[in-house]
Amino acid sequence: MKQARRVVWFILSTVVLCALLGGMYGRQVEATTGSDDSDVKANYNAFARVYDIVEANYADPIDPDETIYGEFPNSPKNGITGAIPSALRTLDPHSNFFDPRAFALLREDQEAKYYGVGMQIVTVPGKMGKLVTYVQKPIPGSPAFRAGLRAGDIVSTVDGKPTEGLSVAQVAEMLKGPKGTKVHVTVIREGYEQPLEFDIIRDEISPQSVDDAFFLRPNIGYIHIAKFDENTDDGLSQALHNLNEKSLQGLVLDLRDNPGGLLPEAVEVSDHFLEKGQLIVYHSGRHSKEKPYYAQHGDDGNEYPMVVLIDRMTASAAEIVTGALQDHDRALVLGEPSFGKGLVQTVYQLSEHTGLALTTAHYYTPSGRLIQRDYENVSLYDYYYHPELTKPDHPQVRLTDGGREVYGGGGITPDVEVPDPKLNPAQETLMQHNAFFDFAKYYLGIHKTIPRDFEVTDNVLDDFKQFLVKQKIPLSDVNMTANLDFVKNHIQVELVHVMFGLAESDKIKMATDPLVVKGLESMPQAKELMAKAKRYVASKTTR
């Protein structure tokens, strides 16, 4: 029972702002039930009677909030489940209750803005066992980025208050504040004898959901969408403008690790690439009549071939986009079968700044495929972290516009399955020891800077070998030679990441990413897919 309770609060804290966000339909003020539902009323009265007895006779004082809502991760009792969360667990994996803290984070994530310094932070156990806060990445263009903070910096104090032992949420709260106010941040940077001091002026922070947009080859664009928030459609429009959409000869749309987000944004993104009037998605439920969503504006005649990349953590709103483009033969889908989250959550705001995300309908792709995979007889942990355990073998078969078979009932099955490449033992050792990122900090601590066109020379490799010896990370000369391209690429990516930010390092990383490379090779196939679909549709209309 304790383990199950731990799983509940763990899922709430880590997945509520990820997979659970996907496909949220909107906010409602209240929910109603039929007045003639005698069973519900009887059970409600029974619960009220039990609670009255407990409150009147229990040996210790009763905290109503704890009993009804439960204790959450920041509470002393560490995740004890209350009546409402326990009841919701019997429905499905995505109906959830939000305490005030979780509800505020939900809205902040949906609105995609807050006031602060603009950097992602992470806490890890330090040498003495206490939590230490690292800068994971400054958001490009943010106050933290402009001030010169780097990935790998240790945040030691905020406004003179030590951060050691504090959680990510606690340090994040210290960094946030009203727009225009100053926060003093002290960081420890490898290679520097003294701590570095930064006075940062807080500003509105709008993390970019469309976080990468660049050319892989002349006139072949690459766009990565990290999630679907209130700024995604605008971000995509800007990205396509920067890529000069009218001249594109191909586009790789990367939706890997995208947990989803807001339904309207998924519809708008799909609208960019489909013809006006084409169905994008529809949903229906027991008390929710079928509601379709169509492309309102259309692709403005842009018919460049597209490849969409997905993996097993591509979920919900990202699956809506993928399913629509696949069903209309607009894009060739590559990668792994997606997560399979096709339940519509309507968010009801409750009293005292709490909220309820309740599943009210199911999503279906234009061909009628159910996106949601089976969640019966599987633990919450396995559902979220081992989705392959509940993947059925093509439970639904439907046809695309061009007459191709596609499969539903378990996420989106790609047209070309490309499994995530596995690391060999030597590569695994380097990654487990975080060797490349730590070396990047070490190298820049000595050399202070690198040029944007930095390349890994023999001297840099010698420094890396010496670093591995100092850190007691085993790597033989034979394994170094056998994995030389892997090593050089990861050194370059991490050094550029630390020095110039993630957007710059992604350009290097994607150039050798196996699935991206496969996507480029598959562009002619994607072009032929569109042509065949048009011929097929034309042949049907002329009969």
Image: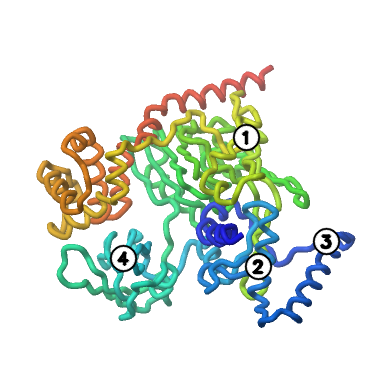
Picture disc at residue 137: none
Helix, strand or loop at label 4? It is loop
Tell me what residue is drawn at x 45 percent, y 43 percent. Answer: 256
* Mark 1 secondary-structure assignment: strand
The residue tagged 3 is 40
CA gap between label 3 and label 1 equals 34 Å
Residue 474: give x, y in percent of width and height. Answer: 22, 45
Circle nearer the N terminus (1, 2): 2
> Which quarter shows the C terminus?
top right
**Labels 1, 2: front one:** 2
Q: Looking at the rendering, which quadrant does residue 195 occupy?
A: bottom left
Residue shown at 42% from the left, 56% from the top: 208
* Residue beneath disc 2: 82
Name the residue tied to disc 4: 126
Residue that protrudes farthest toward the front in the picture: 59
Q: Position of residue 374 (x, y in %)?
A: 64, 41
Q: Earlier in the sequence, mark 2 or mark 4?
A: 2
Q: Nearer the viewer, residue 462 or 224?
A: 462
Instruction: Say what amino acid the circle numbered 3 marks.
Output: Val
Q: Would residue 110 be seen by someone viewing this image from the given angle? A: no
Q: Which is nearer the N-term, disc 3 or disc 1?
A: 3
Query: Which of disc 3 and disc 4 is earlier in sequence?
Result: 3
Amino acid under disc 4: Gly
Amino acid on which the number 1 mark rests in the picture = Gly
Q: CA distance from mark 2 to mark 4?
A: 34 Å
Residue 488 percent across, percent down from the top left: 21, 41
